[in-house]
Image (tube, rainbow, N blue to C red):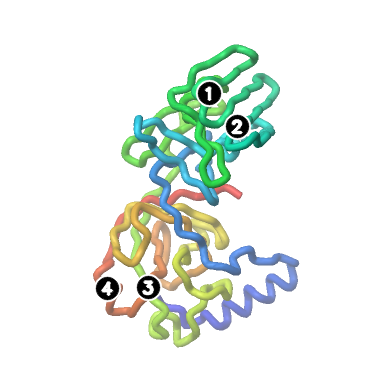
Amino acid sequence: MNKLTKGLTSLAVSLTVLAGGFLSPFTAPAQAAEMAVKVQVNDDLIHFPDAQPFLDGNHTTQVPLRFVTEKLGYTVNWQKDGNQIKVTLNNDNHTITLVSGQKEASVDDATVILDGASQYQNGRVYVPLRFLSTAAGIPVQWDASSNLAILSKDGAHHAPDYQVFESTAYSADPSENGGYGAIDYMGNPLAIGTVAVDPSVIPLGTKLYIEGYSFSGLPKGGMYVYATDTGGSIKGNRMDIFIPGSRKSLQSFGFQKIKVYQIPN
């Protein structure tokens, strides 16, 4: 990737930060995290920062409760009692109460049987996604090609919200960085989770989830990344993915088609 003007552009970004009072949140490498199952509400992919949805032994989609229900407009209250968590969800239409480890829940004072028991793992309560959609009266559709569940909060049809990009890979080799240090356009150290984009297509600073690549130097399945770099040849639906290693070791990456999801702020 050609970055002959990286030093000047980094200076320009720094001046913009000082003038506009903007503090970049991208001071640390993005955390790589594979989502075996993804959840979209209307046109927005849900960001699960520390606990990912999964398919349990009965092939039931289990999702971290808080992130999904807050996106659906519920307030979440919970109480810990020993090893169990009692969770109460409220919005203008429904009140839902459930206890981790149990297959029964209360929806507006009526008892409902879940597809599978809610679970408490690593500080998060998981519940079957189908139960949430049914209890909230929100239809859900499944896109098998992307392992993506789409909740239609507004009742309209929504397609999987990703774009197909052509991707390449780049290293910290000075020859790929205009002779400058291993930093991105925004002045952050290059790390797993750094990608270069065309800012007219994806604004700088956007958080993304990418999948579909095949390379041993990247997390299997997919990962969260930040669009914090640019390149002279990165135009349109094109993305350059930073991967630690030598320039020669990345040549086998070649050109690959990937799916790119934007994560809303």
- Establish if 253 lies above or below 123: below
Which image quarter: residue 25? bottom right
Mark 3, residues whose alpha carbon is within 10 Å: few (<14), some, or many (≥20)?
many
The amino acid type found where label 1 is placed reads Ile
Label 4: which residue? 251
Label 2: which residue? 72
Mark whose residue sits in front, 3 or 2 = 2
Q: CA distance from mark 2 to mark 4?
A: 44 Å
* Residue 52: % across, % down: 47, 45
* Residue 261: % across, % down: 45, 49
Label 1: which residue? 138
Q: Which mark is residue 170?
A: 3
The reply to whether the C-beta atoms of the residues labelled 4 and 1 are less than 8 Å apart is: no
The amino acid type found where label 2 is placed reads Leu
Answer with mark 2 or mark 4, whichever residue precedes in sequence: 2
The reply to whether the C-beta atoms of the residues labelled 2 and 4 are less than 8 Å apart is: no
The amino acid type found where label 3 is placed reads Tyr
The amino acid type found where label 4 is placed reads Gln
Mark 4, residues whose alpha carbon is within 10 Å: few (<14), some, or many (≥20)?
few
| In this rendering, position of residue 207 left or right of residue 116 | right
Please tell me whether mark 2 sits on a helix, a strand or a loop: loop
* Residue 91: % across, % down: 68, 25
The reply to whether the C-beta atoms of the residues labelled 1 and 3 are less than 8 Å apart is: no
- Establish if 208 lies above or below 5: above
